[in-house]
């Protein structure tokens, strides 16, 4: 720009010295204004292209993180499905043992599997890797505010409520293994190579059947099974379905 005005000045000096009529100042001003306009337009275009490139990079990052979330959530659902199978088996064994013992029925060999089922250390597991990676970068990388808020809620739920309930249930089983099971069983979760299913054989079934503490534990565990497992699992499934659908829709938009 400085060179341009310098050239205008030189042209004016040359024309004045040679006696040629100088260009009107207005004419040079028009050229100057045109030059300024082109430079400004050029800068604006460059800024726009740069912004477009940056937005494209952010969208690419967002798409990748959403795809990662999709995989993490799927891993959560697989683990939860397997845990539900364990829970269902434990719940059925609890129902079976309560009814069987209350009817004062004699011992039979199949009971050893039901005793082992109620002592299973059940739990939920969540894949936090994608969420932690996003927090390390910037949560605002998820441009959809509602989705971002729901993702945060999902992992806060997983970290606090679900994990705490899982721990409380595991603590109940661990405490029972020291105070109740140790009185009536030789060991927990024993099995043979030719039969991988766990077994718990009572030392004295008749004595176990009369133990009010064991009966209380068994009935209470069934209630805890609902509040600490079934209810939490159902809530987690609802969370998963909601966020999974939102992420799928957002991925389609970004693509």
Image (tube, rainbow, N blue to C red):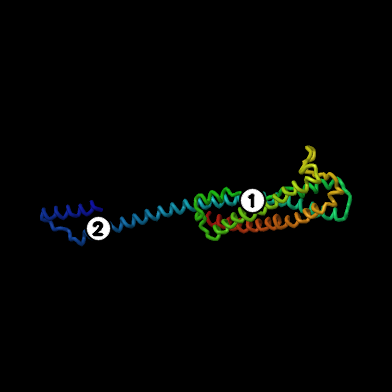
Determine the residue positioned at 56% across, 56% down: 152
Marks 2,1: beta carbons within 8 A: no
Image mark count: 2
Q: Give the vertical position of 119 relative to 146 (above or below).
A: above
Question: Crowding near pointer 2: few (<14 within 10 Å), some, many (20+)?
Answer: some
Is residue 201 or residue 61 the one in the foreground? 201
Residue 85 visible to the viewer: no
Res 32 label: 2
Counting from the top left corner in percent of width and height, residue 232 is at 67, 56
Q: Is residue 219 left or right of residue 249?
A: right
Report the Cα–Cα distance between label 2 and label 1: 65 Å
Determine the residue positioned at 85% across, 46% down: 204
Counting from the top left corner in percent of width and height, residue 226 is at 72, 57
Picture quarter containing residue 156? bottom right
Is residue 130 or residue 28 the one in the foreground? 130
Counting from the top left corner in percent of width and height, residue 177 is at 75, 47
Q: Secondary structure at mark 2?
A: helix
Q: Secondary structure at mark 1?
A: helix
Is residue 26 or residue 245 the one in the foreground? 245
Determine the residue positioned at 78% across, 37% down: 193
Res 189 label: none
Determine the residue positioned at 51% across, 57% down: 143
Identify the residue position indicated by label 1 in the image: 76
Q: Residue furthest top?
A: 193
Of callouts 2 and 1, the N-terminal one: 2
């Amino acid at each position: 720009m400085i060179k341009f005005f310098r050239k205008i000045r030189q042209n004016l000096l040359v024309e004045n010295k040679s006696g040629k009529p100088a260009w009107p100042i207005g004419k040079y001003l028009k050229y100057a204004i045109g030059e300024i306009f082109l430079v400004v337009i050029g800068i604006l275009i460059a800024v726009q292209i740069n912004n477009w490139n940056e937005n494209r990079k952010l969208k690419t990052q967002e798409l990748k993180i959403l795809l990662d979330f999709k995989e993490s959530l799927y891993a959560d659902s697989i683990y939860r499905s397997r845990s539900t199978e364990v829970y269902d088996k434990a719940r059925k064994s609890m129902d079976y043992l309560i009814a069987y013992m209350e009817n004062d029925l004699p011992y039979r060999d199949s009971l050893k599997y039901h005793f082992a089922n109620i002592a299973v250390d059940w739990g939920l597991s969540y894949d936090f890797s994608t969420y932690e990676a996003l927090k390390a970068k910037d949560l605002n990388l998820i441009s959809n505010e509602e989705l971002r808020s729901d993702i945060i809620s999902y992992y806060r739920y997983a970290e606090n409520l679900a994990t705490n309930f899982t721990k409380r249930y595991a603590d109940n089983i661990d405490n029972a293994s020291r105070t109740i099971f140790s009185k009536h069983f030789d060991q927990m979760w024993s099995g043979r190579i030719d039969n991988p299913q766990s077994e718990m054989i009572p030392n004295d079934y008749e004595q176990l059947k009369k133990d009010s503490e064991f009966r209380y534990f068994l009935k209470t565990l069934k209630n805890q099974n609902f509040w600490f497992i079934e209810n939490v699992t159902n809530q987690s499934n609802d969370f998963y379905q909601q966020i999974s659908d939102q992420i799928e829709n957002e991925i389609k938009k970004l693509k």
